[in-house]
Amino acid sequence: MKIQYDVMPYPTNKRPKRQLFLFTLLIFLLSKICMIGQKYKIRKVNMKGLKPPYILLSNHMYFVDFYLNAIATFPHSVNNVATIDGYYRRPKLMEWLGCICKRKFTNDLSLIRSIMTCLKRYRSILSMYPEARYSPTGTTAILPDSLGKLIKKAEVPVVTLMHHGNYLHTPFWDHERKRKVPLCSVMTQILSVEDIRRMDAAEINRTVREAMQYDEYTYQSENNLHITEPYRAENLHKVLYKCPHCGAEAMTSAGITLSCTSCGKVWEMDTLGRLNAREGETEFPHIPDWYEWQRQCVREEIESGSYSFDDEVDVYSLTNPKEFIHVGKARLIHNYDGFTLSGTYRGQEFEISRPALGMYGLHVEYDYVYVRPEDCLDISTEDDSLYCYPTKKNVVTKLSLATEELYRWRMAHRSHAAKVD
């Protein structure tokens, strides 16, 4: 049962506009201005002679990615796939810039139509961030299987723009404070039209995934990038929420330290991004390893049948990007069936369900600036995006991992059932 509002949902199936060169130039100039004072370089590989149309796939760290993309693609026009919150308070501007609106982790057939319009009719660059979220620990997130099918259908070259240093400069879990880190972006043509014609979708997916592998902490160590800011570990507990020493989900952080409020163990982050225990064993010096250990713990909960989440949440809707609508308190359940959000709005009951097989990932935000500076998650449907602020603290990272692992678990069981039949 949907929520009934006084405003109409934003029509994400609108045909995108061709980006006028005036806007291309303005975006380029504004991006150059915004990068003043920041060291960066853009290197191009296998790009000689390549002109649009082509698909541009970028990894996603923070807003600086958009500036670098605009600089790297100039003077060509670009149509960007953008999420609904990117349209907040500026839908007309985003439309004039040629953006294609998308709600995260939903199936939207009109998106394919819009992409093909940009590539075939406008012959522009189609820019996408296939991870569909900022990287929590500076490593590659899940890439959708549908990507290979899209590339096969489009039959245009594929280019990656891999950013390095962006996450270290502005980590997702502490985006308010910058670090002094030089940025490097590498733009590479990874697939030609001939490659795409001879490959199937699975081979294309393997090529894209291999090209989009990255690890920012390894990059930091290999390039000897020392981050000396005294707040470099502040808010790291938002992504490293579980203590590897005692197993409690009770982490906190301050300054250069990460600590467990249950057992008292403390780790320090050095200037090369490595964690070191003040006393005893250092379980995970490499931050992504700690994160993946948490994933394994969630997977074990799912496989043992013990995983569940149930909490009261405060809900804000972005059905139309003109404003967030305060829906109020609701109940959010996450289990083997997926997400269920239920409550009452203006005296009418509602229930929103997203099955586990319908969401391969979850959009989470830390200290979300558009509504209020706290952690939240976004449950989207084809015409609504519901930003849910849990009552329980520091739970959104685990919910994100659980969403991914439940999807994998469901897919594995479905494949096994199909083989048995």
Image (cartoon, rainbow, N blue to C red):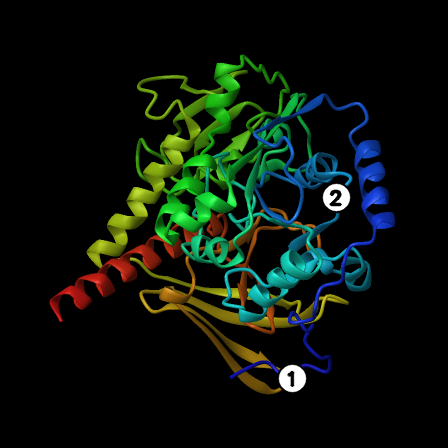
Q: Name the residue rendered at 87%, 48% in the picture.
A: 22
Q: Is residue 186 left or right of residue 413?
A: right
Density class for disc 1 (Cα within 10 Å; few <14, some 14-19, many ≥20) is few
Secondary element type, mark 1: loop
Residue 278, quarter of the rendered image: top left
Q: Position of residue 280 (x, y in %)?
A: 32, 18
Q: Position of residue 258 (x, y in %)?
A: 48, 28
Q: Is residue 247 left or right of residue 291?
A: left
Q: Name the residue rendered at 67%, 52% in the picture.
A: 80
Residue flagged by tag 2: what amino acid is it?
His
Between tags 2 and 1, which lies in front?
Answer: 2
Q: Quadrant of the image for the C terminus? A: bottom left
Q: Is residue 321 above or below residue 239?
A: below
Q: Position of residue 111 (x, y in %)?
A: 58, 65
- Taking depth in this image into account, of 8 and 171 the one nearest to the observer is 8
Density class for disc 2 (Cα within 10 Å; few <14, some 14-19, many ≥20) is some
Q: Is residue 304 left or right of residue 140?
A: left
- Taking depth in this image into account, of 367 and 209 the one nearest to the observer is 209
Q: Position of residue 31 (x, y in %)?
A: 79, 37
For label 1, the residue is 346
Query: Could you say which disc has been placed on residue 76 in the image?
Result: 2
Looking at marks 2 and 1 on the same chain, the residue that comes earlier in the sequence is marked by 2
Residue flagged by tag 1: what amino acid is it?
Arg
Query: Could you say which disc has been placed on residue 366 in the image?
Result: none
Secondary element type, mark 2: loop
Regarding residue 84, the answer to whether it shows in the image is: no
Q: Is residue 409 above or below residue 276?
A: below
Q: Is residue 161 above or below residue 84?
A: above
- Taking depth in this image into account, of 366 and 101 the one nearest to the observer is 101
